[in-house]
Amino acid sequence: MATPLLAVEELRTYFYLSGGVVKAVDGVSFVVNEDEVFCLVGETGCGKSVTSLSIMRLIFHPGKIEGGRLVYRGKDLLAIPEDEMRKIRGKEIAMIFQNPMRSLNPVFTIGDQIAEAPLTHFDLSNRDAWNRAIEFVSKVKMPDPEMRAKSYPHVLSGGMRQRSMIAMMISCEPSLLIADEPTTSVDVTIQAQIMDLLLEIKKRRKMSMMLITHNFGLVGEMGDRAAVMYCGKVVEIGSVREIFREPLHPYTQGLLKCLPVGFERKRELEVIPGTLPSPVNPPQGCRFCPRCSLAMMGCKLQEPPLVAQGKDRLVACHLYGG
Amino acid sequence: MPLLRTEALTKHFPVKRGTLGKTAYVHAVDGVSLHVSRGETLAVVGESGSGKSTLALMILRLTRPTFGEIYFNGIEASKMSEKEFKKLRRRMGIVFQDPSASLNPRMTIEQTLARPLVLHGIKNHDEIEARITDMLERVGLGEEHSDRYPHELSGGQQQRVAIARAIILNPELVILDEPTSSLDVSVQAQILNLLFRLQKEFNLTYLFISHDLVMVRHVSDRIAVMYLGQIVEVAGTDELFDNTTHPYTAALLSAVPIPRPKTGNIERLIVSGEPPSPINPPKGCRFHPRCKYAVERCRTEEPKLTLRGLDHIVACHRAGEIDVSGYTKELWKAIEAA
Amino acid sequence: MPRLASLKDTVLRLLQYRTSFAGLLIVLGIAVLAVGAPVFAARGFAETDPVNRLLPPSARYLFGTDVLGRDLFSRIVYGARIALWVGLLVTFIEAGIGVILGIMSGYYGGIVDKLISAATDMVWAFPPVVLALAVVTMIGPGLTQVVIAIALTSWPAFTRISRAKVQSLVNREFVLAARAIGESDSNIMGRYLLPNLVPSILVVSTLTLPAAILYTTALSFLGFGAQPPTPDWGAILADGAAQLRVAPWIATIPGVFIVITALGFNLLGDGLRDILDPKLRI
């Protein structure tokens, strides 16, 4: 099997707050391969966003990456000094965020912002960097690229801003693009356009994409492989097809049953009882146990490790001999 | 007689353009006529700028229509005085999208639920308390939640309170404006179940505004599709999905990411470009700049809503000539099969 | 929406930061002095004792005595009472006027907003001391007169913040929901908007209070405010000005108290603002 592009091993990121320690990411492991779309799925508070920020080493006080390894092309990103990481950020691993308006600087033209990364990472003249910016504006399918590059973020629509952000992030042709809920703030038809665009870019550049979302529709449409997270831990990993066809972990099963697809109209959906546990005081043993209808005696006492359940299939559940 | 009927409802917002103060108008809602029958769930779907939320605000008189009429149980409501309309208010409720923003952060749950009762004539303290306790139970909360503040509850619990507030006076119509969009998937399901149950228990009529077509398919009897302030298609849910007629509807339905693994080579109708500004809507058919089927007539003449089947109306010049139903039919068949 | 800060939360956070902690200590200190004036001041503030005049600070007379032999410590302590009382009264009147105007301005918009905003801008432009002088020339000097004059010119601070907050809240869903259930305008302003303005009003109060103290002590210094023998700090300062070379403590000590009090409130206000302002709290 080929070496993965990125291997996350036992990542731990904690936040030290006045109310206690929030173990946002508590021993998370998965791999992202070359040329694939990997989805990190979960509900609020599961730690998926924090995981992606940790990969970029964008965790600041009061958060701290407490342990684990992030092996990118053989290098442990957590062991290298900050200035080396800066060379990787933007150039090899890039990230697009949920709300493009917040992430774009309102006082610079988008052309300037797109040109920034290449200017930093490559030895380009201002003119060359600007031309490259225009090139990428057209690559993200914005009409009239020369004029667009001279526009400021506030005159653009939501969809265009997201495209600008994408242009910014791929301008250095990274190997891994992390997209954190990239379409939550745009309309459905624009979402379809953006998703199409991302897939096209991925195909053209053989780029890998890590898609962070809570939308199972996007997972189904875009994902090759996925990891389901709950309460700071990974509960299941596998190919998207497998996970939909045969979800193994009770949480995954419960989530999929919550989706109003394939049921008789207005029929009540099967819900997962209970609520998300407090992030400061997660339950002992398996974190899903209090809400799990298949819980056994041992579940409360021991945390199930992630074990293989077939080719490229991992589950963290005692039901599967964990 | 339908419970709710609107007739050419229109809302134009004035907007100042330029320093000389030339006023332009935002055509938020333009000539919307629809009806909702008692006991049914009518979904109004559209993207941002479609006017669906403004429509809801007009029905509840939270903003005055520029033109048009609203009939509630046959009574014309848009021209009444506020005092008269107040009597109608108890027959309608609304639930908003963001539950934390829709509850007064400085009022306890009990106070929030007591207000509608007090405002509509129920002064007896014991009766108020009893009704609040009863309502809390019906929405899945307990007495212990009464003296909490909204920020002490989870999003799902807050939304339950909002629902309780909307129905505590036993209304006939409840408008739900994206009631589950800000909630987690597992909580969404719980809230939907609650809504189903309450609809049956109280024989409620729902006007369900949403952009989530997967959910809309599951909850509604009929669907009205809006684009840039106008209705482009209305039909029963199955009919809309089986015989999609308007190109925008087809694009909308096929753009929705289905929570099923990639279903192979199903073609989607990807709509090009961006939604135009509602300040200067395109002439003729408002969708024509983005429609791949547009012809000359579409650029000049506004299409009227015409009947295309039993309880299926569409506003498209080419409704009889083109067939866009293929996009959605295949797609949704694939989901059901999976 | 950000989480509300409960009282306990707020106080705890105030104690966390050195500056707001210092501010809190100072304010509490002055308050204790003010409230406990009769206890702390061994002698009254008006008791003259010409034999013991102009004595420097000692064990017997903690702050020394002034030109009439009055115990400066007693006068300062009663002065604290006056300062706080004045500050609270002015703030109360200003808040009353300012908040009501601000809420109406923000809620109704249109012509109401235009009128109130114009009035606010005009009054804001007036230097309070000048207006107070004008008022005093009309109705005569006195602490009460000065208090009213200052209050009438400084309410715009409250109007501004109230209007801004109301504008940000008025289209929030909870206000829409209130209208949907049939709440009247006055109810919406009083029950829904006003309670949500309290944190901001509180912050502004901690900043207008010291300003009020500064203005009134200035006017008392000029002789227009407190009349003798009222031991307003400004008045004491005025007395001390004449004796600066001989008995510098008479002017210095009240000056120091004025500065420290104002500083204390400002630090406290800054801290409160950092805590209560809508900042996302994890």
Image (cartoon, coloured by chain):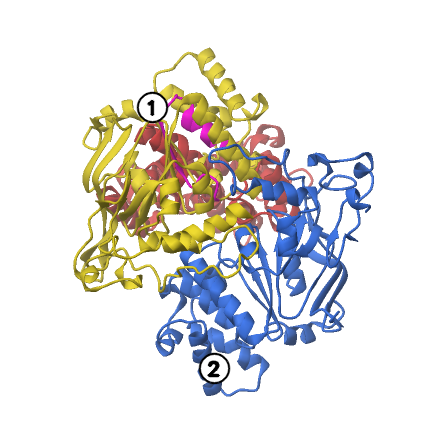
Chain colours: A blue, B yellow, C red
| Circle 1: element type | loop
B69 is higher (above) or lower (below) than B91: below
Q: State which chain disc 1 sits on.
A: B
Crowding around mark 2 (Cα neighbors within 10 Å: few <14, some 14 to 19, many 20+) is some
Tell whether B272 sits left or right of C36.
left
Name the spot of residue B103 as percent of width and height, x first: 46, 34
Q: Which residues are magenta?
A: B160-181
User: In the rendered structure, which amino acid carries the disc numbered 1?
Assistant: Arg
Q: Is residue B87 above or below residue C224?
A: above
Quarter location, residue A62? bottom right
Q: Which residue is mark 2?
A: A132
In the picture provided, is A112 more to the left or to the right than A308? left
In the image, is residue C212 above or below residue A193? Answer: above
- Judging from the image, what secondary structure is the residue with disc 2 in? helix
Would residue A25 be counted in the magenta stretch?
Answer: no
For residue B90, the mark is: 1
Q: Are marks 2 and 1 on the same chain?
A: no
